[in-house]
Amino acid sequence: MNTPSPPASPVASAQQYRPELRAEIRVSDELLLGNGTVHLIKNTRSGQSFKVGGKEHFLISRMDGSRSLEEIGAEYAGRYGRRLSDANWQQLLRMLGTRGLLVGAPATAPQQASAPQSGEKPADADAPKPGRRLLRGTLPLVADADATAHRLHRAFGFLLSRRWMVPLLTMALVMEATLVVRAGELALATRETFTNPVLLTATGALLWQSTALHELAHGVVAKHYGGRVAEIGLRWRLPTVIMYCTVDNYLYLRTRWARVATALAGAAMNLLFLLPFFALWLLAPLDNATHDALAGLLFLGSVQAFAMLLPLPPLDGYKIAAQVLGATELAASSGAYLRLAVRRDALAAGYPRRARIAYTAYGLLCLFVLGALVAGAVSLSHFLLTTS
């Protein structure tokens, strides 16, 4: 579609101009932020992202090249009861144009996004800076991460169908139920594994592979839902070296379920990774050392998987909670609201009902999870001390 460039003087011909967002622009759903709501807009070419309010989103979401400003303005007046002045249009078009969001406006050069949202990192947020430091940094492993994720999805994407995923997840749940019933046995075996350097090293290597698959699973599931993988590589914070996979447009996937599934994919992959080792531990005739090593792997691997589901930033569970509650910067917003509510500050009553429910639910969830972690740690310590 041929779309004229934004007019030099919106006052002169604004009503005939048909603005159109560039194809690489992504707009999020409405998200809670503090005592209001915002939409996130990202230029995937430059990496820049920013927030707009509901009224701005109403206008921007209609800029598809088919409507003139006059038509958009009429819809706006019907919704909000007033028409925008030429000065209002000029300010909005200038903002969108300078950010390179409109067809016909100069594209902005790629650069780091201004502010990551809800745990999202821009593609180069952790990229090595000039003069990479020895103790921390990143190393991309593939030249085209998105193409790599596409090939992995083409090879293994069939596993995401219901006919495969339902039985696989069912087996994982059966495995975890069995491990819970035999948790004491696993805890003792894990303690023995820590006394054997060879078995401990082997267990650590397998857990590292599980972590790598965890990251790749995020990318494959994101590709399944139309996402884009920006980078796959290694990140080190010595002595720790882990793999990472950055989904460039996670917050802008088409549906909330797609975003939840993408965040959930890593922990699910950790559990599925354990299934063959669970079968060996449960059914195969093994010597005591190997049996204990497999038990240690199952115990630590399960802890690893469920730890990623804790609703604390920057873990996957936090991203899931933010999507379920429809919020961005959920932890900060919840903390601010709950402090006001505890003090019975009148400002707390100014929060919309949806925000009050979401922030209270998140606070209670965090308290429950932290309480469960403390109780579990105390029980485990007591069990190990009484059986030593």
Image: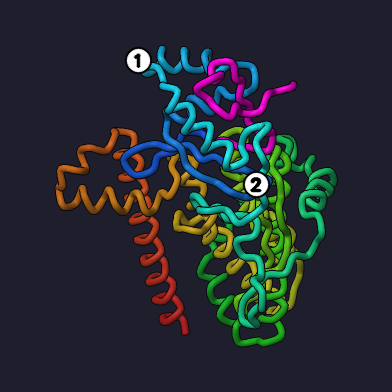
Between 110 and 300, the one nearer to me in the picture:
110
Q: Quadrant of the N terminus?
A: top right
Residue holding disc 1: 81
251 drawn magenta? no
- Say which quarter of the image contains residue 104: top right
Q: Residues within 10 Å of mark 2 (few under 14, many from 20)?
A: some
Task: Inspect this view and state whether residue 293 appears.
Answer: yes
Q: What residue type is labelled 1?
A: Gly
Q: What element carries label 2?
A: loop
Q: Which residue is drawn at 78% across and 42% down?
A: 157
**Region in magenta:** 1-27
14 drawn magenta? yes
Q: In the drawing, what numbered circle is on residue 152? A: none
Contact between marks 1 and 2 (CB within 8 A): the answer is no
Task: Inspect this view and state whether residue 207 appears.
Answer: no
Between 373 and 133, the one nearer to me in the picture:
133
Question: Viewed as shown, does residue 181 lie left or right of 234?
Answer: left
Vertical comparison of 357 with 74: above or below: below
Q: How crowded is mark 1: few (under 14 residues within 10 Å), some or many (20 or more)?
A: few
Sequence order check, earlier mark of 1 and 2: 1
Alpha-carbon span between mark 1 and mark 2:
35 Å
Between 248 and 370, the one nearer to me in the picture:
248
Residue holding disc 2: 108
Percent x, y of residue 384: 46, 78
Mark in the foreground, 1 or 2: 2
Q: Which residue is drawn at 42% across and 30% down?
A: 54
Main SS of the magenta part reads loop
Vertical comparison of 113 with 71: above or below: below
Percent x, y of residue 219: 70, 50
